[in-house]
Image (tube, coloured by chain):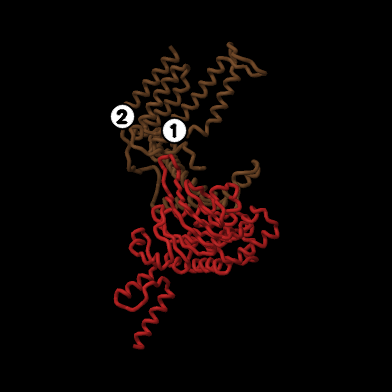
Chain colours: A red, B brown
Amino acid sequence: MSIVVENLTHVYMKGSPFESVALDDVSFEIQDGEFVGLIGHTGSGKSTLVQHLNGLLKPTKGRIIVDNIDITERTKSSKWLRQHVGLVFQYPEHQLFEETVYLDIAFGPKNLNLSNDEVEKRVREAMELVGLDYDSLKDRSPFEISGGQRRRVAIAGVLAMKPKVLILDEPTAGLDPKGRDEILGQIKDLHRERGMTIILVSHSMEDIAKLVDRIIVMNNSRIALMGKPEEVFSHVDELQEMGLDIPQIAHVIRGLRERGMDVPENIYTVEQAAAAILAMVRGRSNA
Amino acid sequence: MLKDITIGQFFPGQSSIHRLDPRVKIIITFVFIVIIFFVRSFIGYGMILAYMALAVILSGVPVRYMLKGLKPLLFIIALTFFINIFFTSGEKVIFKFWFFTLTQEGLLQGVFMGLRLIFLVAGTSLLTLTTSPIALTDGIEHLLQPLKIFRFPVHELAMMMTIALRFIPTLLEETDKIMKAQMARGADFESGNLFQRAKALVPLLVPLFISAFRRADELAMAMESRCYRGGENRTRMKIPKTASRDYIALAVTFLLVLGILLNSYL
């Protein structure tokens, strides 16, 4: 499903002394099946932006078109929209409320008025997608399992709606490295194997560099940069001015190049860097 | 939708009303509330209106903003108005319909009751609009000092109020977030009959309570690790001082009280 955002502006608490512009004339397009990274420091408007994409917030000005349907015009389409555009909030485990893991994941599908068989099928499938064992976990309370598992139950709760577009707001915040790698791996699989369109909001340049096709950089309620990772990460000074950065490994590569080593310029993941440095060392020893 | 609540909200500013000593402001508001019940004529309400208008103009709070705070109470005000109009017995009957009797006394009573409610709400909301929650609880703590003689835990009460007020915006934000998270999973808070709506609140209230308890626990821990002990020997950062503007405010309020008492009893 494609998403088109045209001249989107959002003003919070308009007409009160607390009025603030959260989005200022933002326009972009996301193609079907794309994996887009959304970065920007705290308060840059990322969260406000993603909440527009599934109709939780209405634009003050501008249009949003999802799958060729203008969602700003049709107010009745909210159910359709929320089923097709899944949004996983920051710390999604705080939204869990049911007595068992099964019931919590089933909350979304039940709201879609599906049959019991279909609900069960979807819960099973969603748990599989996030790597949770259905039989051993379905009857446990979501409050007695580990933090990483809780987060995955919450993500499964959104996946059980079978969205075509999945938006994740910092899905790895506060997780240990193992939990983080697992969740990112599963998100990658959702994109590769299921062909889901994914929008990942993150503060980790490493994760973004490793996963996404395209990056959108938000700064002061506007889009500051947009493009492929290598394009965006080549604007080092601009990114640092916005309180952002390039992946750490890219700093290492820059340092090597400054010292006259022959490594290619646009390297943004550890794997690429390792390969490039090995190639360079081998090239030297051969010479 | 939750952001429309203005009762108890602080409107930041630097006006002379904002800078009044919170103790003085609380006393004045209390006197104002009491004196409203002594008003018996339109002239009296005229004085109240003039006093109120002066305070609002000095405070710099937009009138539109004040009126917005009255909106949720419109129903109660209207109800009081109509009940008083039709159920006050009197001599001069204006018209009669079925068992409704409209009398001149009733009409007057209804208008007075309506005005009384409006001024009560406007007066108290002006207090919270121009006094930050911290200043407000500080003021209350000072005014309740005499109760310490009866071993009343004044400081603890003030601390509880400060914390409660401090957490209102946090909890509102949390409510908003959880509501949105559940709406993203297809929850519907806005349609259905009363029973369905009450049931729809479970996915909102359970996480909200859990997070409130978690926050309370964390706050208690943070206070204890900084060796918080209430009451005895605790000094404060801001010591309230009365200035000349406080005495002027008291004098104006005294004039209002005098005017209304003279108007009602002479």
The residue under label 2 is which amino acid type?
Arg
The residue under label 1 is which amino acid type?
Arg
Quadrant containing the C terminus of chain A in the rendered view: bottom left
Task: Assign a secondary structure to mark 1.
Answer: helix
Residue in the picture at 48% in, 17% down = B40
**What residue is shown with label 2?**
B245
In the figure, is residue B252 to the left or right of B175? Answer: left
Residue A225 position by quadrant: bottom left
Q: Nearer the viewer, mark 1 or mark 2?
A: 1
Q: Are marks 1 and 2 in contact (CB under 8 Å)?
A: no
Q: Position of residue A131 (x, y in %)?
A: 58, 67
Would you say residue A144 is visible in this rendering? no
Residue in the picture at 54% in, 56% down = A87
Q: Position of residue A23 (x, y in %)?
A: 43, 50
Badge number at residue B64: 1
Would you say residue B128 is visible in this rendering? yes
Count of numbered labels shown in the rendering? 2
Quadrant containing the N terminus of chain A in the rendered view: bottom right
Q: Position of residue A251 (x, y in %)?
A: 35, 70
Q: Mark 2 belongs to which subunit?
A: B
Closer to the camera in the image, A13 or A148 = A13
Badge number at residue B15: none
Closer to the camera in the image, A285 or B170 = A285
Task: Assign a secondary structure to mark 2.
Answer: helix
A30 over A271 or under it: above or below: above
Closer to the camera in the image, B244 or A118 = A118
Q: Mark 1 belongs to which subunit?
A: B
The span from disc 1 to disc 2 (Cα, nearest Å) is 26 Å
Q: Residues within 10 Å of mark 2 (few under 14, many from 20)?
A: some
Q: Residues within 10 Å of mark 1 (few under 14, many from 20)?
A: few
B106 over B239 or under it: above or below: above
